[in-house]
Amino acid sequence: MEVHNNKKLFRFQVVFDGGETALLEYRWKKGDMLLMRTYVPVAHRGKGVASLLAAAALDYARANNLVVQVFCPFIELFIQKNPQYSDVVRPANSGA
């Protein structure tokens, strides 16, 4: 499975055979990457696709010296389970 950063549509995505797409939408605010929502088609759930998208987005942020703000509950849970990514996340109460 290959994750692609679709910069035109502001999302990390995996396109499956048949055209179904799993995605992690993001936005930009004052230079921060805002992770908004994750969606995986029903037929592909439970296979680690959302985790793959989360890791790709967080790895991208780290490689590009970006700070992430998290609005997606799945991404919050992913970071709790993978604290090695906490260094790229702006704390919710930071006032930024």
Image (cartoon, rainbow, N blue to C red):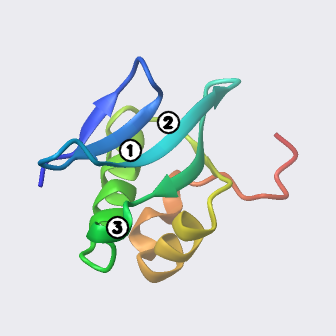
**Residue 51: which disc?**
3
Q: Quadrant of residue 62?
A: top left
Residue located at (43% from left, 36% from top): 11
Q: Quadrant of residue 70?
A: bottom right
Give the camera-side residue of 89 and 38.
Answer: 38
Residue located at (11% from left, 55% from top): 1
Question: Residue 7, image x and y in percent?
Answer: 39, 22
Indicate which label's residue lies in the foreground, 1 or 3.
3
User: Which element is circle 2 on?
Assistant: loop
Image quadrant in which the C terminus is located = top right
**Residue 62: which disc?**
1
In the picture of the structure, the residue carrying the numbered disc 2 is: 66
Q: Earlier in the sequence, mark 2 or mark 3?
A: 3
User: Which element is circle 3 on?
Assistant: helix
User: Is the Cβ of the residue at disc 2 closer than 8 Å to that at disc 1?
Assistant: yes
Give the camera-side residue of 44 and 60.
Answer: 44
Q: Which residue lies furthest to the front in this view?
A: 18
Question: Residue 90, image x and y in percent?
Answer: 66, 51
Q: Residues within 10 Å of mark 1 (few under 14, many from 20)?
A: some
Q: How crowded is mark 3: few (under 14 residues within 10 Å), some or many (20 or more)?
A: some
